[in-house]
Amino acid sequence: MNQYIPTNTLAGLTKQEVESRLKRDGLNELPSQKRQSVFEIAFNVLKEPMLLLLIGSGLMYLLLGEPKDALMLLTFVFVVIGITFYQERKTERTLDALKDLSSPKALVIRDGEHVKIAGKEVVVDDLIILREGDRVPADASMMEVTNLLTDESLLTGEPIPVRKSVWDGKLKLTHPGGEDLPFIFSGTMITQGRGIAKVTSIGVKTEMGKIGKSLLEIHDEDTLLKKETGRIVRNFAIAGAILCIIVIIMYGLTRGSWLNGLLAGLTLSMAMLPEEFGVVLLIFMTLGAWRISKRHVLTRKTPAIEALGAATVLCVDKTGTLTLNKMRLDGVMVDNQYLDLTTYTADKLAETYHNLFEYSMLASQQDAFDPIEKEIRAKGEKLLANTSHLHPNWKLIREYPLSKELLALSHVWQSPNKTDYVVAAKGAPEAIADLCHFTAEQNKALLANISQMSDRGLRVLGVARALFSKESLPTIQHDFEFEFIGLIGFTDPVRATVPESVAECYQAGVRVIMITGDYPGTAQYIARQIGLANTDTYITGPELMTMDKKTLQERIKITNIFARVVPEQKLAIVNALKADGEIVAMTGDGVNDAPALKSAHIGVAMGERGTDVAREASDIVLLNDDFSSIVHAVRLGRRIFDNLKKAMAYIFAVHVPIAGMTLVPVLFNLPIVLFPAHVAFLELIIDPACSVVFEAEPEEHNVMKRPPRNLKQPLFGKDMFIISLLQGLSILSVVLIAFLLALYRGMGENEARSLAFITIVFSNLLLIIVNLSHTDHFVQILKSKNKSLYWILGGTLIFLALVFYVPFLRNMFHFAKLSIDNIVLALGLALVGLVWFEILKYFKRLAMKNGAKLV
């Protein structure tokens, strides 16, 4: 139970009380993400089936007395572990670099003395002294207040600072937001005034901590793509395991060597298992993260890039995401004459408006932290430059703060050359009208002017002035004889790139929803500015409180504006969209956004002013807070999916001849063609490297002019399966012909293996080229600007030359030197195996010219 303490007895906690509370409650900090140890990373990597097969094959070679083959296979294992470990540590370092909102310093009263300590050392019942510019280290109740304003946008989403009052010892703690509450909250900023507060909650028990704790209850979901690739790999693994057992039994029975039979079975399992699916997915996402980083976007979880490409709804926090979270003075009104400062280009401000800017500045702090006062001073100094209306040498005599009874403040100034005091007041227009003793007619005219400015989306303040010649100043502002000067209007401006980005989202079939803690009128005005659809309909937070899940799911289908919502409701909105089958992306920067960021399929946090909690919960961080970067991420996600389908088709096709040339020799009692080292070479070097070629292919021209892909559309559909199977069987046929032809011509086992292997590699390279496009012909693809294609072609051919013509490598791979005519034969057979696909593409192009739709 909190107890009110009179301000004249504030001595603070004793050293013994502090130590007792630290022991009981711990430090004032949120738990950080747990790092994986070296052993945990290695264990997770070694659970991959391909690596287990490689290790098993390596051990088999050791038992067979072939240490060179064993060393080669085990080297692959260590390389993969090293790459994974490097990537994991790099991700953790990047995350640490983002944690720039460290625990703030705090000035506390302990043993009757003022002591500055680290924010994490603050304990319950500590008395903290707060001044302009301080960040609040913990939740607390106000004991003393002098004109105190706090920016609670991190918790509420509202950019306007709110007033604080003294706690009466009775009022119970409420949620952040609202004027004249006696509570302050961890992570918020003091923008004006000063005060003393008593800490009520620290760490996970603060409002910020509660939100952080709720994140632990939301579990990450695998992307649909990862689930599908996992399912494909699992099915192939089962088939491979069955065939492996058959091969082992047949080999043992027909050839009498069960150990070699086990090795042949493991080789077939490696050939059957499309482990590259996972590798290619990782490569695509990693390179996608690298590409999007050029747009100042940090990808914390790479699968989110692909998910963005399938996003159907983008939930957007207004403040700081659609807007700059910066109050801009856009319009003023004097004598019923409105001046739009956004289009004002005159070199000199008309004399009519000089007094308004002069007294607006005099009614503001000289070293302001409040965003409105900072804007008033910046704009005033610019527009009043070289005039007599700037007073750097005037002395501030007294401040009259805002109060519940009067929402206006006044500053009393003394000029070096005058005996009279000059008084400047600003505040709510109604409060300024009260100070000026307006008549009913004047109030009516004022309300009309306020309405005119509010319709422009402006937050309006009134300004007045007075002269006072008496020696003793009055105790209240009403005792001055104020003269009304005019109105000033502020807006939180929309980011320049937002309207175009929203339009592109609609063009791409992505719905945009605004979720904000602001008022409906302001939200609607911003929505119209950015081109949001259906701006006449909105749902407020209070409505959501009385709405069941089913009703929300129905109304959310046509509602794009949610106003005056609290964090729990943002989470409910995202979950309702997910229940409707939408793929949801959520942007935000505040602590209030974190649960929704984590619950959404893709959480996109703002990096410049975003909170640590929001970034921890997100999948993607926009380092420059540029909303248009999200659209680039959507485009990249769609490109990734298109190219991934091509890469997966290639991988499946190339596995058919690899598995076939492993199985056929066992079934027909022929010499073994492929050993584990050959399969490992094909799968862990050529295939992943070739995936880089597919990843580098530019997006299709219509990638952002089509709706998001159907979630029921499989990555590996029936049509793609048939085409890939035919490609694989064609290659298997020509490779088998090459092998049998070599044996028929009396070549040795190593020579026949060499001819078959080089035919597989040539077919592999040609398969990459023809699959880069299902419409363009062979020559057009080779003329493309895909530099990765030429690197892979050149690198593979060089490696082949080394393997076949360097004795040490040739012996390790059990190859023989091939003549030029055999190499030409292999290339010719590879071309024959895929020429039918080029013919098929020719007929597809004819169909497209005749107006048929290409599937």
Image (tube, rainbow, N blue to C red):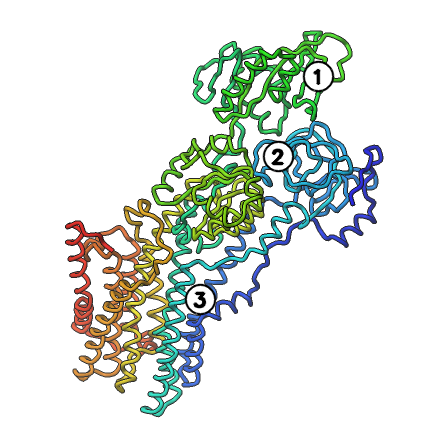
Contact (Cβ within 8 Å) of mark 1 with mark 2:
no
State the residue at coordinates (26%, 57%).
772
Q: Residue 70, relative to residue 6: is it above or below?
A: below
Residue 80: numbered disc:
3
Dot 2: element: strand
Dot 3: element: helix
State the residue at coordinates (56%, 62%).
36
State the residue at coordinates (15%, 61%).
839
**Alpha-carbon distance for marks 2 and 3?**
49 Å
Which residue is denoted by mark 2 in the rendering? Answer: 151
Tell us which disc is closer to us: 1 or 2: 1
Residue 414 image-quadrant placement? top right
Q: Residue 651, relative to residue 126: is it above or below?
A: below
Quadrant (top left/top right/bottom left/bottom right) for the N terminus: top right
Which residue lies most toward the right here? 9
Question: Which amino acid, mark 3?
Answer: Val
User: Which is more N-terminal, label 2 or label 1?
Assistant: 2
Question: How many C-alpha atoms fall within 10 Å of the one at disc 1: few (<14), some, or many (≥20)?
Answer: many
Q: Residue 750, relative to residue 395: is it above or below?
A: below
Residue 186: percent from left, percent from top: 66, 42
Residue 449: percent from left, percent from top: 52, 17
Question: Which amino acid, mark 2?
Answer: Asp
Residue 40: percent from left, percent from top: 55, 66
Please give left or right for residue 350 compared with residue 686 in the image. Answer: right
Residue 741: percent from left, percent from top: 18, 79
User: Which is more N-terminal, label 3 or label 2?
Assistant: 3
Question: Which amino acid, mark 1?
Answer: Gln
Dot 1: element: helix
Which residue is denoted by mark 1 in the rendering? Answer: 477
